[in-house]
Image (tube, coloured by chain):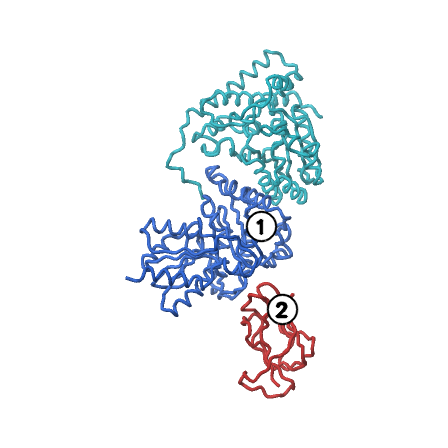
Amino acid sequence: MSNSPAPKPRKMFFREAIASAVRAAMLEDPTVLVMGQDVGSFGGSYREFDGLYREFGADRVRDMPVAENATIGIGAGAAAAGFRPLVCITYMDFLMLGFDPLINYAAKLRYKTAGALTAPLVVKTTAGAQGQGVAHSQCLDAWLMSVPGIVVAAPSNPQDAFSLMAQALRHDGPVVYIDHKRLFPSPGEVSVDAGLQPFGVAAVRRRGEDVTIISHSYMVQVALKAAARLAEAGISCEVIDLRTLAPLDVDTIEASLRRTGRLVTLEEGQTTCGVGAEVMAQVFSRMGPRPFVRIGALPAPVSSNPVYEALCIPDPERICDAVTALLKNAPPA
Amino acid sequence: MIYHLTVPKAVPGVEEIRILEWHGEPGARFEPGDMIVELETHKAIVEVRADQPGFLRMVMGQPGDWISIDDTLAVFSDAADEAVPADAKDYSELTVAFEVT
Amino acid sequence: MTPLDPFDRLRALRSMMQIRAFETALAKRKDHGFQLLSSGEEAVAVGLSMVLRADDDLLTGGRSIGPALARGVDPGALMAELLGRAAGLNGGRAGRGHLSDPRSGFFGAHAVVGGNISVAAGVALARKLSLSEAVVVIMFGDGACGQGVLHETLNIAANWRLPLLFLCNNNGLSVSTPWDAAMATPRLSDLGATFGMPATTIDGLDVELVASTAGEAIAAIRKGGGPAFIEAKSIRLRSHSTTARETRTREALAELETHCPISALAARMKLSPDEIAELQRTVDGAVDAAERFAEASGYPEPGDVLTHVQ
């Protein structure tokens, strides 16, 4: 171990956090590959793979044709045969095209071979609505939570973007790593020496006493904005960032809810069978029900129309209204 | 006259950018069309070019520094030796052209 | 076509007879579950296996028992796997649809029609990047030829010159659909030719022809020539699966029987009835041993149901 001091945290773009983690893994482990559309000299649609093609070459950083099914299948097969592919699916909406190799093969490989084969495959995909229309806006995060055999990770900030990616590229099974279009503009401090971020550990982003807000990905940023506004109105919100949806850190959720007594779940995806539904079911089965509200997208496709998109996606105002109403119906004892 | 160069709202949704490279030092003269500075957003590089002649007097950050939209990046003057008042509220807005690459 | 030497011919015949005997015994059992059998198609898997090296990888679809046996998977462990016993190849968890024995060169079956094709290309990519000389073979049926992922994978494999042999076992039917009702191309090997790889259609009932064609293709792939496509036309003597309805007439099936690849090779070798009976006894004995091994093994522990999920 080196005796030199740990490098200081450095402020960087969200995309740079991802590129740093992938680069570090590629330097340390020659079996790490990157595959996807526009990941090569273009550096990724969000420049999240900037510099990797120049440094590691076409063998390890491979541009793919538009063929999500085969791309994930090839990643899964290469993983089963000893490599660690990172497959990039630019829009989460198109992850569906590769569900067969991801879910029918990769997720089940360890189980069906009784551990003899595994598929250490990372599928990175970008979710979220930002003016691009009904088929380029979805957050399907919850769909993946119920697939036995996969980890579902969703960073909300550059540090976790780095650490969760570092962890994912060392995990011995499939990981779906979900980032979000609206996370890319916001820089943040990243300590590359912070090491890996174990899966299944949520983070308390803001301490509070009156209500527990559970969220993940970009909605954590929106929750924090809402919490700041609510604080001005005298309402104290605890904001918890799940970091991973599977495994889910129910311990942290429970500890918070036992203190605040009120639960708000917030996601950009649908509330029907959503992340919030699962959070509620799991925490309530441990401690009994508490007053709650689930916040998510309106039950409609998310159009590129600016009026409709803004209505569909939760914003600080909708969150503040929901929290205020919840406290009105369930006032402090 | 004293001018300040503020961070352009070049890319929608961007609140913070990073200074990439200055193309002149304090004391340098710029003509319209000259590149003053390159800035990095999460997506692209913004090239900021002078759209009026002037002298660069102060830079408010170095390459690698972060700066928010609407903050002052640099101070310019019409004449090379004009006194630069401490109070920025007297500054005018420097006219620039920017290009997102 | 280069004929196999007498020793290899005997091995090929015995291997095909082994498959037939194994599957016949399996189908007679009340506890066999749901099976897809290779009756009439044995020459494709056996011909291929004659020319594979120990470090080559074979992947298949759901019609996996014949190919697994041809590749050299242990019949006892295979029978145990098919009967869901703990001593099975995969602890009884995979069954026919997903069995896997990489150490024998049988990387795995996958029951999703066409689902293993891109996986095989991934394995081929891994071998290529490891600078291995191994060749990967993906066997699939005419039924898989409509799948988009086949076309996606043909394209990428050709572009990347992957060491991958696409072996299409065209037994003429996808459950009830004749291959030429489903597919627009005159030959299924046209699918490979479209992407610029060497592609050929052969008689899949002639085990020696399969062996020599596959041998040539694999030798070229091993030298870095990129992927190839072989369509081997076989026959399906039974219905699609042990539970699928048979759609053909008794007369049609009787006619098909006259093209049995096992009988054809035995006739070509001019074996006497006694010699054939002796071979039959050998393979039946091996199947018997396999069944007894499987029956002696218990079922997996209920307590292990949640192991190896992640």
Question: Are marks 2 and 1 in one subunit?
Answer: no
- Looking at the picture, which amino acid does disc 1 mark? Leu
Type of amino acid at the residue the image marks with label 2: Val
Toward which corner of the image does residue A99 lie, by quadrant?
Answer: top right
Chain B, which colour?
red
Label 1: few (<14), some or many (≥20) within 10 Å? many
Tell whether C117 sits left or right of A317.
Answer: right
- Front tag of 2 and 1: 2
Q: How many marks?
A: 2
Do we see residue A252 in this rendering?
no
Residue C270, compared with residue A99, is above or below; it is: above
Q: Position of residue C285 (x, y in %)?
A: 50, 18
Say what secondary structure mark 2 lies in.
strand
Asked if residue B4 is positioned above or below residue C7 in the image, the reply reads below
Residue at position x 46%, y 50% in the image: A142
Q: Which tint is chain C?
A: cyan
Residue A130 locus on image (x, y percent): 55, 59
Coordinates of residue A9 in the picture (x, y in percent): 49, 65
Badge 2 is on which residue? Answer: B46
Residue A135 to residue C197: above or below? below
Q: Nearer the viewer, residue A283 or C133?
A: A283
What colour is chain A? blue
Residue A206 at least partly seen: yes
Is A220 in front, or is C231? Answer: A220
Write down the quadrant of residue A45 in the picture. Answer: bottom right
Residue A41, horizontal then vertical, whole percent: 65, 56
- Residue drawn at the location 47% of the way across and 64% of the way down: A6
Q: CA distance from mark 2 to mark 1?
A: 31 Å
- Output the chain of dot 1: A
Residue placed furthest toward the left: A333
Chain letter of disc 2?
Answer: B
Residue tagged by mark 1?
Answer: A33
